[in-house]
Amino acid sequence: MAKKRRYKKKKTVASKADVTVVVLIILSILLAVLIYTKSGMIGVKLNEILGGMLGIVQYILPIGIFVIAIKLASIGSEELNPKLIQYGILLVSLCITFSVFQISAGELQNNKELGAVVKDAYLLGSRK
């Protein structure tokens, strides 16, 4: 007599990409709530710090992280580093563009030392 095959159910293990996508989506939603609503002590402090370092680019940060997470989920690729490097280059380019705009508009003066210019830029960014 022939034996009947028994099929065992395979346990599905969450891949590294799935965990990364979930973490990125949660991070982007949390950043969006804290930055856009300036809620609580953490939101106010985070808004001041990111505003000082990035200026208006702080509002693009959660949107970009969310887009990267959706792109990773749709493609299914596990390569996160190239996307984050491209996003980092985009943010640096935007920061440079806005800094040049502030210098040309006269809000920042470039005849000071570099440390003084950076402090002025941080103060302008934290005050908006």
Image (cartoon, grey):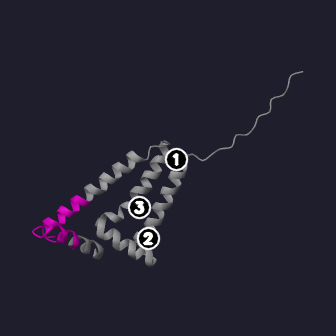
Spot occupied by residue 66 in the image (x, y as percentages of width and height): 44, 56
Magenta: main secondary structure: helix
Quarter of the figure that contains the C terminus: bottom left
Q: What element carries label 1?
A: helix
Q: Which of marks 2 and 1 is nearer the N terminus?
A: 1
Q: Give the range drawn in magenta.
A: 95-119
Q: Which of marks 3 and 2 is nearer the N terminus?
A: 2
Residue, disc 1: 17
Q: How far apart are marks 3 and 1 (CA)?
A: 19 Å
**Which residue is depicted at the point 42% across and 74% down?**
43
Q: Is residue 71 magenta?
A: no
Query: CB of mark 3 within 8 Å of CB of mark 2?
Result: no
Report the residue marked by disc 3.
Answer: 62
Q: Is mark 2 on a helix, strand or loop?
A: helix
Q: Position of residue 109 (x, y in %)?
A: 13, 70
| Tag 2 residue | 34
What mark, if any, has residue 124 been given in the picture? none
Against 48, residue 12 (above or below) is: above
Circle 2: residue type: Leu
